[in-house]
Image (tube, rainbow, N blue to C red):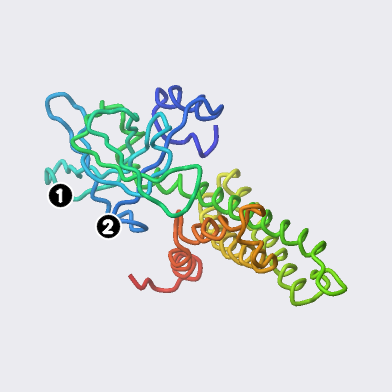
Amino acid sequence: PGSHARFGTEAQKRAWLPGLSDGTRTMAFGITEPDAGSNSHRITTTARRDPDTGDWLLTGRKVFVSGVDIADATLIVGRTETVSAKEGRTGHLKPSLFIVPRDTEGFHRRKIDMELSAAEKQFELTLDDVRLPADALVGDEDAGLLQLFAGLNPERIMTAAFAIGMGRYALAKAVEYARDRTVWKTPIGAHQAIAHPLAQAHIELELARLMMQKAAHLYDAGDDAGAGEAANMAKYAAAEACVKAVDQAVHTLGGNGLTREFGLASLVTAARVSRIAPVSREMILNYVSHQTLGLPKSY
């Protein structure tokens, strides 16, 4: 057990963690909404208690959620009403996490038609008074926000690894081509106009990989604050390096870079996604601005 197993009840851990660890069970994650992308405080999916049964009733919408068609369940971020002993229901909503099995009644999905070709499909989810048992709530209702953000750091590290792998793949294709492709008397890789951008792409990918490894080390060590900063920086650096590497690879191959044979054309769109999801580069710059540098917020 590590920081990945800090939350949830013992029964939830026994029910889910073994299968999630060995791959026999899968769980998708639904947080983004049409009007609440990076701002988790604007989430409008709400959960209320049925006073008669103690069940939860979830209502809301999510967008750009992948894996819901194959996952056993989706971890939905909803908001529960704050109840004060002195004031009663305050009307304030706080984020909480709920496990929603794939075939739950009232849990509907619609595939979003994406231009990007990828193995995973993107879905819009509609929850229409989805009834869940009391134990569908993950862990402590009061720890919802802490639980939510604890899961975002490893996601950003994973995204950084994905982007770096994509960039290294593209770079390897470009280097191989530049060594073999001969125009006039020498391979095109002998020309600095080709060689230097590829060398720069390699350097930037390696720098991003070091930051990703640092973030992974801090996360494994349980350093939440350090991992948060490093994970954001790693994700930013990896996305920027990936986009540049893929673009330079396509440029190196010229027309061949857009053919199916070399497998680079589809990466142009996929690389661009790494700058957007699961958090945009601008939100990372906001994080570093006020969390690391202590600058005032602009929002």
Name the residue located 64 percent from the left edge and 62 percent from the top edge: 257
Q: Amino acid at mark 2?
A: Asp
- List x then y, in percent, for residue 275: 50, 61
Name the residue located 75 percent from the left edge and 68 percent from the top edge: 199
Query: Which residue has dot 2 on it?
Result: 35
- Mark 2, Cα crowd under 10 Å, few <14 / some 14-19 / many 20+, is some
Name the residue located 82 percent from the left edge and 63 percent from the top edge: 179
Q: Amino acid at mark 1?
A: Gly
Q: Which picture quadrant has residue 80?
A: top left
Discs 1/2, front: 2
Name the residue located 46 percent from the left edge and 44 percent from the top edge: 151
- Looking at the image, tell me whether mark 1 or mark 2 is earlier in sequence order: 2
Query: Which residue has dot 1 on it?
Result: 91
- Mark 1, Cα crowd under 10 Å, few <14 / some 14-19 / many 20+, is few
* As drawn, 45 above or below 135: below
- Any part of residue 145 in sight: yes
Numbered-mark total: 2
